[in-house]
Image (cartoon, helix red, strand yellow):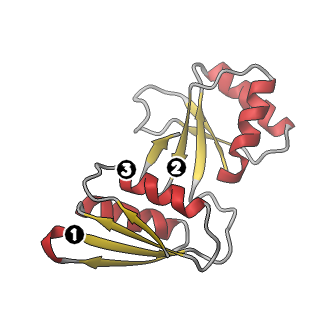
Amino acid sequence: MTMIDARNLPCPGPTIKARDAIKGLSGGDMVQVLLDNPLAAENLERMSKAAGHTVILQAQDKGEYTVIITIRTERSDNFAEAVLFTFPTTKLAVAGEKALLAAGLSVKVLPMPEQLAAACGIVLRLPPDELEAGKAALQATNITIEAVYQQTECALIEI
């Protein structure tokens, strides 16, 4: 079992540490995360469940929590988790969509999430396993990426 001590870390630190640890694990492996922030424990639980993992949340004495995550056996290709690309202009986003489609990637155009900007705009969404291929396709066509975010059910985290 992989152990993570995320006590004294502000959000979204515990979620990022757990996400990074989970990336290298196989189905059936377990991660134990120690926390002292109830909101971080809830966020970690939601993120893990959204990814299809089994989660046990245990409250402990003195405001400490333990979250135990069992990694799902099969990784699905649903978009509960995804990566979002933002661009300086809508014109670049449209060009980016064309480049990603030409590269054979599973791109979807979405409105800009409110958490990212109050202004109108669009983002391009890909499954997490297509992140590197997406970056390469955009760079090969000289399309400027403004930012890349990991999307989970409960958070957007710039990566």
Is 72 left, or right, of 15 in this rendering?
A: right
Determine the CA span between mark 3 and mark 2: 15 Å
**Circle 3 Cα neighbour tier, 10 Å, few/some/many (<14 / 14–19 / ≥20):** some
Q: Earlier in the sequence, mark 3 or mark 2?
A: 3
Which residue position holds label 2?
Answer: 151
Which residue position holds label 1?
Answer: 64
**Circle 2 Cα neighbour tier, 10 Å, few/some/many (<14 / 14–19 / ≥20):** many
Which amino acid, mark 2?
Gln
**Circle 1 Cα neighbour tier, 10 Å, few/some/many (<14 / 14–19 / ≥20):** some
Which amino acid, mark 3?
Gly
Which residue position holds label 3?
Answer: 13
The disc at residue 26 is none
Q: Secondary structure at mark 1?
A: loop
96 or 4, nearer to the observer? 4
Q: Secondary structure at mark 3?
A: helix
Residue reaching furthest to the left: 62
Residue 92 position in % (x across, y down): 67, 21
Q: Secondary structure at mark 2?
A: strand
